[in-house]
Amino acid sequence: MRRPRSRWQRIGRPAALLGIALAVLAGCDPFASSGSAPPGALGGPSSTVGPSATPLLRPTAVPSRSPNATPTATPNPTPSPSPSAPAQAGADTLIGACPGRAPTDLAVGTADSVESRNWSGYVATGATTFTCVEGIWTQPKVRCRGSAQQAAVYWVGLGGYDHRSLVQIGTESVCIDGVAQAAAWHESLPRETYAIRANLQVSVGDRMWAQVRSVGSGRYRMTLVNLTTRKHISIRVVNSTLKRTSAEWIVEAPTGGCPQACHTLRLPNFRTIHFEEAWLSLDGIRRPLTGSRFVHTREAMTTGDGQTRSEVSSTGKDGTSFAVRWRRP
């Protein structure tokens, strides 16, 4: 049975398109690290040069999907002690792999497969204490199709799957008058704190490492590292309503035209994007995407009439990698 679209997909968000242009014109240091009071933190003022007050483009908190009863089998994982991201980044001590002991149980968890109108990738569900999620991808080169508004966002997050609350960080590709641009961004829902980060430069081909981590008492730290330039941002937010019942590694088609005419935007042709080092923390253990004690769900993005917008591969033998491929609907 197809589940109804969440109301959070119908609410406007600040304009990422204008935000990128303003970030380029602002003259901000693109390699500066964020401070302890990040722009867009809940309850605090925003000083980020970026999104305008006119909501045009927004990722969405809850995927719109219809279940597919055919699960996808995945191979046994071979976990590594830690990803290469922190060592390559050379950043401060705030940056580290998701915490936890290495798993002694290498069994693969339950697999599932669903379809979504706006998400594609993998979601971990079936537990209530996910405390950290992380992954690596390469910022893709996209092909804009005409001059219509198009966008794709790539992120990791906690929450948001069947819940209104979500903490997420990642990068985006946006087509403005047929020209593709890239930027870093973050958000904490349900409070609308979507922000384009002018102080972390993202270019096509850059290797990005992202992490969302609970630091206790409803507080979260979002970190995004450009492994190519060795620069990073680390942002703290408070989200007391977040339910840590899911962890995500997602390519998303955000919503545009809000508030007057909200609709899911067309995806630019991002070809194939590979997620690697997809890890999470659960019950004090650092587990791969396919680990036991939770369900890993593969989400393919489709149109309302069933045409494929993007398809998702099975996970690799290491249990921490997969690919999302663009498809013309």
Image (tube, rainbow, N blue to C red):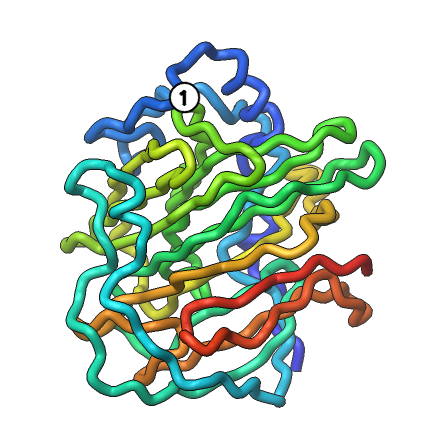
Residue at point 58%, 70% (across, down) = 299
Residue drawn at x 33%, y 89% as measured from the top left: 107
Total marks placed:
1
Give whichever of 218, 134 is nearer the camera.
134
182 is higher (above) or lower (below) than 7: above
State the residue at coordinates (62%, 29%).
Answer: 17
- Horizontally, residue 320 falls left or right of residue 97, namely right
Is 114 left, or right, of 78 in this rendering?
Answer: right
Is there any visible trace of residue 49 in the rendered image?
yes
Left or right side of 263 for 6 = left
Quarter residue 3 falls in = bottom right
Q: Position of residue 313 (x, y in %)?
A: 60, 72
Image location of residue 151, percent across then percent down: 66, 42
Q: Is residue 144 above or below residue 4?
A: above
| Residue at x 26% of width, y 54% of height | 213
Provide residue 223's location: percent of width, then percent of height: 31, 43
Q: Position of residue 171 (x, y in %)?
A: 50, 42
Residue 4 appears anywhere in the view: no
The residue under label 1 is 30
Which quadrant is the N terminus positioned in? bottom right
Viewer-closest of 219 and 22: 22
User: Vertical placement of 110 versus 257: above or below?
Assistant: below
Quadrant location of the C terminus in the rendered image? bottom right
Tag 1's secondary structure?
loop
- The residue carrying pointer 1 sits among few (fewer than 14), some (14 to 19) or many (20 or more) residues within 10 Å by Cα, namely some
Q: Amino acid at mark 1?
A: Pro
